[in-house]
Amino acid sequence: MSQRICRIDSNLKSCNCTYEPCPRKGICCECLRYHWSHRELPACFFPPEIERTYDRSLKTFINYWGKKIR
């Protein structure tokens, strides 16, 4: 089994999370695990106008992207 190295610097370049005291910024696997445990998705799943509301719920995700797909 190979070990993966987290590319925090690279991840931070595309991280759109505006929650500044977040200890998981740039550590995508921890961020996803944390949000999923709360039945949410991370900031990177949302456009900036939704991300800034901090409503990362599955309902918000489905409502937003469901309208885009139609």
Image: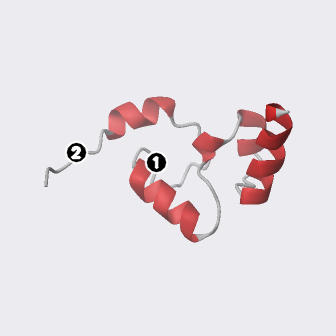
x and y, in percent, of residue 67 in the image: 86, 38
| Residue beneath the point at 52% across and 37% down | 15
The CA span between labels 1 and 2 is 15 Å
> For numbered disc 2, what is the local secondary structure?
loop
User: Would you say residue 23 is visible in this rendering?
Assistant: no
Observer-nearest of 24 and 69: 69
| Residue beneath the point at 71% across and 35% down | 47
**Quadrant of the image for the C terminus?**
top right
Q: Disc 1 or disc 2, which is closer to the eye?
A: 2
Residue under pointer 2: 5
Residue under pointer 1: 25
Name the colour scheme: secondary structure
User: Which residue type does callout 1 highlight?
Assistant: Lys
| Residue beneath the point at 55% across and 70% down | 37
Placement of 54 over or under 52, stated as above or below: below
First-in-chain label (1 vs 2): 2
Kindly indicate whether the residue at mark 2 contacts the one at mark 1 (C-beta within 8 angstroms).
Answer: no
| Residue beneath the point at 22% across and 47% down | 4
Q: How many numbered marks are there?
A: 2
Placement of 30 over or under 69, stated as above or below: below
Observer-nearest of 2 and 33: 2
x and y, in percent, of residue 11 in the image: 41, 36
**Quadrant of the image for the N terminus?**
bottom left
User: Would you say residue 22 is visible in this rendering?
Assistant: yes
x and y, in percent, of residue 43 in the image: 62, 46
- Mark 2 is surrounded, within 10 Å at the Cα level, by few (under 14), some (14 to 19) or many (20 or more) other residues, namely few
User: Which residue type does callout 2 highlight?
Assistant: Ile
